[in-house]
Image (tube, rainbow, N blue to C red):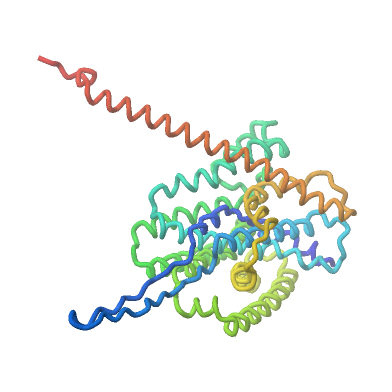
Amino acid sequence: MDPLNMSSASIENEQLLRDSIDTESNTAEEHELIEVESDKPSSSSSTQPIQVADTPTTHYKPLVSPQVTSYSKAVAICLVMYGHILVYRWWGLPVWLAPLFRVSTLSVGVFAFLSGYGLTKSIQKSGTDGFFSKRFTTIYIPFFVTTVCFTCLFRGSYQSLDNFTILLKYLSLYLDLASTIDGTMWFITFICSWYIIFYFVFRFIKNDHLRVIIITLIAIFAYYRFSQNTKYWRLWLVYSNQLFNIPLGVFFATYENNKYIQKFIKEKKINIPIMLVQTALIVILYWKVLYIGIQDYGTPHSNRFNTAQTVSNMLFGTWIPFLFTLYFNRSNVILDFLGGLSYEAYLLEGILIEMKYSKTRVEDGVLYFLITFACAYALKRVNQAAIQFTISTVSTISQKIAGILQRQSYHPLRFGTNRE
C-alpha cells in the first residue's frame, strides 16, 4: 500500500506552523554581538609610570541572529508547504518523493525552537511589560483578519448558524476537531498557551537556571498528559511531539554565552563533527518515524512513534538555524523576503492549497507557491494597517476613559457629595 495513504491520518500533526507562527521568532532581532570588557589592571604606584595594559575583549556571537531567524523561517515555511503538496496535491511529482511528506512536521520544529529562543531573548531585554499586548497585535490580529477575510469565504462559515458558532469558537482559540474552517491553525492555540506559561515563569522567577528547569518540567508534564489522551489523540500527538523544542530554545537563549557553546559556534573542528552526527541522526530517525508511522497507523498513542518524532523535531529544529549560523554568512534578499512573510504564508497556505489546481502538472505546484506568497505579501500590508488601527483605537479609548475619571475626581458633587 502507498506509504502516503497509509499515513494520511497522522498528517494532521504535520500541519504545524508555517512559523510562524511565529511570528515569535521575530523577537530574535534584539541579538547583537555583546562585548564584555575585563577589568583593567590598576597602577602600581603614584611615583612610577602607569602601565596601561591592552583591554582584552571577549566577543560573544549570538547563536541565532536576526538574519539567521529570517532565513530559517523562510526555509521552514517552504518545507511545510512542500510537505503539504505531497500530502494533498502531488502535482505529478516522482513517486520516490512520497516519503518526504513528513518534512512539514520537522520544519514546524524550527518555528517552535525559534519561538522559545526569541521569547526568552525578548523578555531578557524588555522584561514582561507589555508582553501580552505585543503578542496580541503580532499574532492574534493577523489570525483574526485572515480568518474573517479569507478562511470564512472559502469555508462558508457565514452560511448557517452552526457554521457561525464554529467560527466564534475558532476565533476564541477553542480548536474544534470537527471544525470546517481550518484545523491547521491549532499552532496558534499551542503558542498562545506557551505565552501564558512564559509570562508567569519569567515574571515571578528571576533565576535563569530555575527558569530553564521549570519550563522543561512543564514540557515533560504536558508531554506525558498529551500522550495519554485517547479522545483527541491526533491533536495531542501534534502538541506533544513539538513540546520540547520550546524549552530547547529557552536553553540555548539562556546559555549561548557559555564558553562551550561559543566554541561550538566559532571553531569548525568542533561544530563540523557535531553537525555531521546530528545530520546522520536526523536521517536515521526520519526513516524510523516513517516506518513506525506505517506500522502503527491508527494507534491512538504510539509511544514508539511519538518518541522518535519528538527527537527528530528537536534535532531538525536546531539543525536549520545552526547551519545558517555556522556556514552561511552572506546576505540573501530572497530568503529575507520569504522569512518576513512566513507567518502570513502559514495563515494562508492551508486555505489556498484547496484551490482548483491540476493534480498532474508540476507547474501548478510552482503556481501554488507564487500565489501563496503573493497573497501573504498583500495580507501583511492589511495586517499592518489593522494593527496600527487597533493600537490607535485602544490608545484613544484609554485616554478618554482616563480623562473622564480625572474630571470626575475633581467634581465630588457628581458622586453625591454636598458642598456646604
Residue 340 vs residue 213, the one in the foreground: 340
Q: Quadrant of the C terminus?
A: top left
In the foreground, 81 or 41 = 41
Residue 311 visible to the viewer: no
Query: Relative to 66, does residue 135 appear above or below in the rendering?
Result: above
Residue 97 shows in this picture: yes
Residue drawn at (78%, 68%) of the image: 99
Q: Is residue 186 above or below residue 245?
A: above
Could you tell me residue 394's position as x and y percent? 45, 34
Seen from this angle, which residue lies furthest left?
420
Identity of the residue drawn at 51% across and 43% down? 137
What is the tally of numbered marks visible in this picture? 0
The spot of residue 11 in percent (x, y) is: 71, 59
Q: Of all residues shown, which one is farthest toward the top?
A: 420
Position of residue 177 measured from the top left corner of the image (x, y, whole percent): 63, 49
- Quadrant of the image for the N terminus? bottom right
- Seen at 29% across and 79% down, the residue is 41
Tell me: 366 left or right of 230: right
Q: Left or right of 297: which side holds 261? A: left
